[in-house]
Amino acid sequence: MGRRISYRDALREALREALQADPRVFLMGEDVGRYGGTYAVSKGLLDEFGPERIRDTPLSELGFVGAGIGAALGGMRPIVEVMTVNFSLLALDPIINTAAMLHHMSGGQFSVPLVIRMATGAGRQVAAQHSNSFEGWYAHVPGLRVLAPATVEDARAMLAPALADPDPVLIFEHAQLYNLEGELPDDGPLTVDIHSARVRRAGTDVSLITFGGCLTKALQAAEQLAAQGISAEVIDLRVLRPLDDATVMASVRKCRRAVVIDEGWRSGSLAAEVMARIAEQAFFDLDAPLARVCSEEVPIPYARHMEEAALPQVPKIVAAVQALLGNTP
Amino acid sequence: MIEFKLPSLGADMDEGTLLTWAVKPGDSVHRGQVVAVVDTSKAAVDVEIWHDGVVHELLVQPGEKVPVGTVLATLLAPGEVAAPPETVLVAARHAVSPSARKRARELGLDPDTLSGTGAQGSVTLADIEAAAAPSAAPDRQTEMRKAIAAAMSRSKREIPHYYLSETIPMANALTWLLQRNEGRPITERILPAVLLLKAVAMALKRTPELNGFYRDGAFQPALAVHAGVAISLRGGGLVAPALHDVGVKPLEQLMRELADLVKRARAGSLRSSEMSDPTLTVTNLGDQGVESVFGVIYPPQVALVGFGSVTVRPWVQDGEIRAQPVLCATLAADHRASDGHRGALFLAELHALLQQPQALADAAALPATNQGTLT
């Protein structure tokens, strides 16, 4: 039998395991120590590991992300928590111009074994400036590996291979997932890879391709579609860079129809990239136009009903699938 | 611009499949010319056009099944010049999904001829597979049975039939035919059926309310008699195509045309006007040996005349009993269009006409009415 655990607790277990396993590992970020983390992920770790390894930082993303890069270059294995993706904009320069490019710029002499964790996404009525989904932006950049754990298992097990990667890895935790509960095995090592997509539900009529916070919605949509006799396959991308084309194309070649669900804005979204790759690689297997369900192209509204209307939702996914199958409501 | 629409080739026809075009854009066509072959549930029919003109555009492609009334083609009237298109419209591309197009190529199908069930009406892989599946070759027997069932059910549902019968002595007529045919080659002999058709057409002059159509709550008389001749087909089913203008054609001509009609009906190459023009139906089951037949009217016609077999019966004439060949003629008529009294007059007239076969043969040839104008 497995044990039930929340996404938040699974992340904390992963951090503790990493801190215990390797003295080079340390965590730093805003409020990760005494406050226990804005999402309570690092709660209790300061007491267990002390202020040398659980370090509160000033409100300066540019500064502490840069410090993390320096520590990584100096032989440490830093885990930097940028509270949310919204604030990571202040650290774009060190993340992209330094962390992602140093290996290239140094002719392979330097690697940056840095892990950056951040919360992402909307849906909690925290208004436009705290509700962005910029995973797709980072997935644009060569030199970065971008992960989007959408399950308790990935929350628990993605950190170890991310730390083992000699190059910078960004982990995006959708803020609506922290309370998600799931089953984990009682004991024994839990390992996952950080290069492949996964089929979370098998189906034959349409591929629902998604990641992060939209996985739950896609699975719910698949359930509703099943009741209508439509068999939907749900693909969890998990790794947004580099994309696992093989798994996506295998699913699309089987189902011949695809809907990409992405909380990012439609234009220039990761969904657009996935669709382009399908068109490039599986065009002759398609039996319907490609479709996507993305966020409306507005700053995410504060009002609950407006926010809900702006985001991908289960009924929108179901309607998109029905349209692909020629069933106009 | 003249629109050429798919005609209804009978009360039982709702749709037809265009099989081939006999013309192409730019061709001049003349009234009565066969321009297309259309498959109905009963037969492949040569469809005629009723306008002179020049074919402008063919709008329905071979293989397409369309409802009656669909514009099949447009024609330029004589002297008309096609208006230059005001805006150059790019023809909407027939949407075919990539996988459907690929599969169609493998199967040697043209996906552009199929209608789609997918997103935005696109042709999908499933549509291609369905089209390629060994589709039950159109089962003519089943289709025809359905068509007959529909027409006859409608007839019995809508038409208040009344029935009359009259036994007609045939000695004069048969003797006259025997003399008329004597010494002539088989191909020039006239069969009794032709004399009967002629007699029906002449008798209708007295009772025009039996010849025509009941449509939209009113009877519309027909000027000419286009007799629908019930022809049973080998393998089952029947058609009743028109023998045109029976009233004004000489017996010899009627004989030739009837033979041709039967041959073409059985070969499945009837013309559209023959399918749609009959103004009343004549059925003759004499060959099967039955004495009388009370028919079911083919809507929207209002009468059906039935003939049984010629049999020799004891017959009282001038106070004496003699063996005499007799024929039972029946009338099934639509009570909305006529009453039994008028029907009785028709049968009495038929009786009288068949006693004077030479007069029937000599019946004044009136100018033929134009085919098709009344239908």
Image (tube, helix red, strand yellow):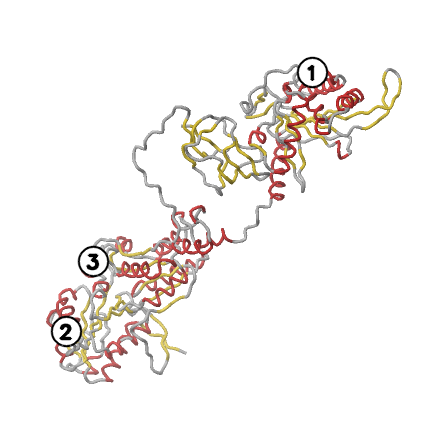
Would you say A31 lies left or right of B113 here?
Answer: left
Query: Helix, strand, or loop for circle 1?
Result: helix
Residue occupied by mark 1: B362
- For disc 3, the neighbor class at 10 Å (few under 14, some 14 to 19, many from 20) is some
Subunit bearing disc 1: B
Query: Helix, strand, or loop for circle 2?
Result: helix
The amino acid beneath tag 2 is Leu
Which quadrant of the figure contains the C terminus of chain B?
A: top right
Residue occupied by mark 2: A102
The amino acid beneath tag 3 is Ala
Q: How far apart are marks 1 and 3 (CA)?
A: 102 Å
Q: Distance between the residues labelled 2 and 3?
A: 35 Å
- Indicate which label's residue lies in the foreground, 2 or 3: 2
Q: Quadrant of residue A138?
A: bottom left
- For disc 1, the neighbor class at 10 Å (few under 14, some 14 to 19, many from 20) is few
- Indicate which label's residue lies in the foreground, 2 or 1: 1
Q: Position of residue A114 (x, y in %)?
A: 19, 76
Instruction: Tell if the residue under mark 1 belongs to the same chain as the one under mark 3.
Output: no
With respect to residue A72, does B237 lie above or below? Answer: above
Residue occupied by mark 3: A127
Subunit bearing disc 2: A
With respect to residue A107, does A175 lie above or below? Answer: above
Q: CB atoms at circles 2 and 1 under 8 Å apart?
A: no
